[in-house]
Image (cartoon, rainbow, N blue to C red):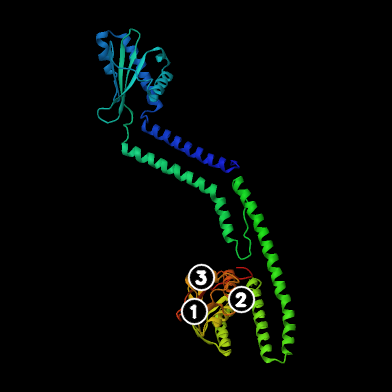
């Protein structure tokens, strides 16, 4: 079956199916409530019995007709003769009685020219419904009969209500399944949009109604344009950063020739700060996906960084296991931790690094005793090139935390800024112990 192309058409199809199922279900319940208890064969036997009763009645005197017909009665069919009858025909009001009349005439065509009155009455013993009828014969009198039972008793109203509620629930379930199928392309589009991050495009399936396909096509084109623009800007910024190194080296050589030691030291400090800014910028735009993940001892890597910082005069300590094997990108991890240590060094006197395992992840905490960052500004601190208040500025490029956060997300982890146990800023890295096996998370 080919579905309508437009969303409106598919919604209309869902509504039609729901209404159709409700109608069919109600018809089935109605049929069940008015179910007949006699087969075609038994109805045929009743028709033949009426034909025989007419012949017997006409063959006997009026005084003996009632007695003769009563002798022909059976367990479920009673017969009698009356000169006149008060039985009223309700065949035009009940579909079951109309169908029964047709079945009787089909079984005994001789009765088609006779007046046949049919009605329903409650059954005395079984609580069901009996068929009561009167057949007009040639001399104007009537053969009356009662068929016990003909229809089942009306079901308990509570059962009928329950069955109708069950029908409504079934229709709603089918409609819900159809609606979910209808909106699944929208959900897939939203999931693809959520997966698009870190400069990587997520494949978008062009499926669903025409409106959704148009949105998916437009989103794919927009995604391509944005990533091309981002890539062009990133490559331009990286090229500029690299090109700046040459004049910086020339300035460094010229500064070394200055006789004024104070001016030489000031210029060297400025040039070092410029190089630090360039390194931070390149670190931010290097996502590290070209590096393959491998099995490393992350405890040894953290201890090495702590020892290096301590050799440079930092008050830094390590807490954690002597060995912790993980699958990760060692250069990327080292770059992240170096950024965090440099950030803490600029703002604090004491630094503490803690390593631990938490199920399928491992956690690295970098805590310092500096001024910290106010909770309402921590999200801003993770944006690139953002300098916060003077207490946390410290002359940096404002990109260390942003670069670390970007790299951690590319590795499938998370970075959290919090109040550290030393009274300053606490940075918690949570990374998977089984990292991506190849370039790309």
- State which tag comes first along the sequence, 3 or 1: 1
Q: Is residue 349 above or below residue 176?
A: below
- How far apart, in angstroms, are the residues tagged by discs 1 and 2? 18 Å
For residue 326, the mark is none
Which residue is pictured at 53% across the width and 42% down the height? Answer: 11
Locate residue 429 relative to residue 84 in the image: left or right.
right
Dot 1 lies on which element? loop
Quickly name the residue at label 2.
Answer: 397
Q: Residues within 10 Å of mark 3 (few under 14, many from 20)?
A: few
- How far apart, in angstroms, are the residues tagged by discs 3 and 2? 17 Å
Dot 2 lies on which element? loop
Q: Nearer the viewer, residue 254 or 95?
A: 254
Quickly name the residue at label 1.
Answer: 371
Question: Is the C terminus in the top left, top right, bottom left or bottom right quadrant?
Answer: bottom right
- How far apart, in angstroms, are the residues tagged by discs 3 and 1? 13 Å
| Marks 1,2: beta carbons within 8 A | no
Whether residue 413 is visible to the viewer of this picture, yes or no, is no
Q: Nearer the viewer, residue 430 or 366?
A: 366
Which residue is pictured at 62% across the width and 55% down the height? Answer: 204
- State which tag comes first along the sequence, 3 or 2: 3
Give percent across and percent down for residue 157. 31, 36
Quickly name the residue at label 3.
Answer: 377
Which residue is pictured at 36% across the width and 21% down the height? Answer: 46
Which residue is pictured at 42% across the width and 20% down the height? Answer: 102
Dot 3 lies on which element? helix
Give percent across and percent down for residue 69. 28, 16
Question: Is the N terminus in the top left, top right, bottom left or bottom right quadrant?
Answer: top right
Residue 309 sits in quarter:
bottom right
- State which tag comes first along the sequence, 1 or 2: 1
Residue 104 sits in quarter:
top left
């Amino acid at each position: 079956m080919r579905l309508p192309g437009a969303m409106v058409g598919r919604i209309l199809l869902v509504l039609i199916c729901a209404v159709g199922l409700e109608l069919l279900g109600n018809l089935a319940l109605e049929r069940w409530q008015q179910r007949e208890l006699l087969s075609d064969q038994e109805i045929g036997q009743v028709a033949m019995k009426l034909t025989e009763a007419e012949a017997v009645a006409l063959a006997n005197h009026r005084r003996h007709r009632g007695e003769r017909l009563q002798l022909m009665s059976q367990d479920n069919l009673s017969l009698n003769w009356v000169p006149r009858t008060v039985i009223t025909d309700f065949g035009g009001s009940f579909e079951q009685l109309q169908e029964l009349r047709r079945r009787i005439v089909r079984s005994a065509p001789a009765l088609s020219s006779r007046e046949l009155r049919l009605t329903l009455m409650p059954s005395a013993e079984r609580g069901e419904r009996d068929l009561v009828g009167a057949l007009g014969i040639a001399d104007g009198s009537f053969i009356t009969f009662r068929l016990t039972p003909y229809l089942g008793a009306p079901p308990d109203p509570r059962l009928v209500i329950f069955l109708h509620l069950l029908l409504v629930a079934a229709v709603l379930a089918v409609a819900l399944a159809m609606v979910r199928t209808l909106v699944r392309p929208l959900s897939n589009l939203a999931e693809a949009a959520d997966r698009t991050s870190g400069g990587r495009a997520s494949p978008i399936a062009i499926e669903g109604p025409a409106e959704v396909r148009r949105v998916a096509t437009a989103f794919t084109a927009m995604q391509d344009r944005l990533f091309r623009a981002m890539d062009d800007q990133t490559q331009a910024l990286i090229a500029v950063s690299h090109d700046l190194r040459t004049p910086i080296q020339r300035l460094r050589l010229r500064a070394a020739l200055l006789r004024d030691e104070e001016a030489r030291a000031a210029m060297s400090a400025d040039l070092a700060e410029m190089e630090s800014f360039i390194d931070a910028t390149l670190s931010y735009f290097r996502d590290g996906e070209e590096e393959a993940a491998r099995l490393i001892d992350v405890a040894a890597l953290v201890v090495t960084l702590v020892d290096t910082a301590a050799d440079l005069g930092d008050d830094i300590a390590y807490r954690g296991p002597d060995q912790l094997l993980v699958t990760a990108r060692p250069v990327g991890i080292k770059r992240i931790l170096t950024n965090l240590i440099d950030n803490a060094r600029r703002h604090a006197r004491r630094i503490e690094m803690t390593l631990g395992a938490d199920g399928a992840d491992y956690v690295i905490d970098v805590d310092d005793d500096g001024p910290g960052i106010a909770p309402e500004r921590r999200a801003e601190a993770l944006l690139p090139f953002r300098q916060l208040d003077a207490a946390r500025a410290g002359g940096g490029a404002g990109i260390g935390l942003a670069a670390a956060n970007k790299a951690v997300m590319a590795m499938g982890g998370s970075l959290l800024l919090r109040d550290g146990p030393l009274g300053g800023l606490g940075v918690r890295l949570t990374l998977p112990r089984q990292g991506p096996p190849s370039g790309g998370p």
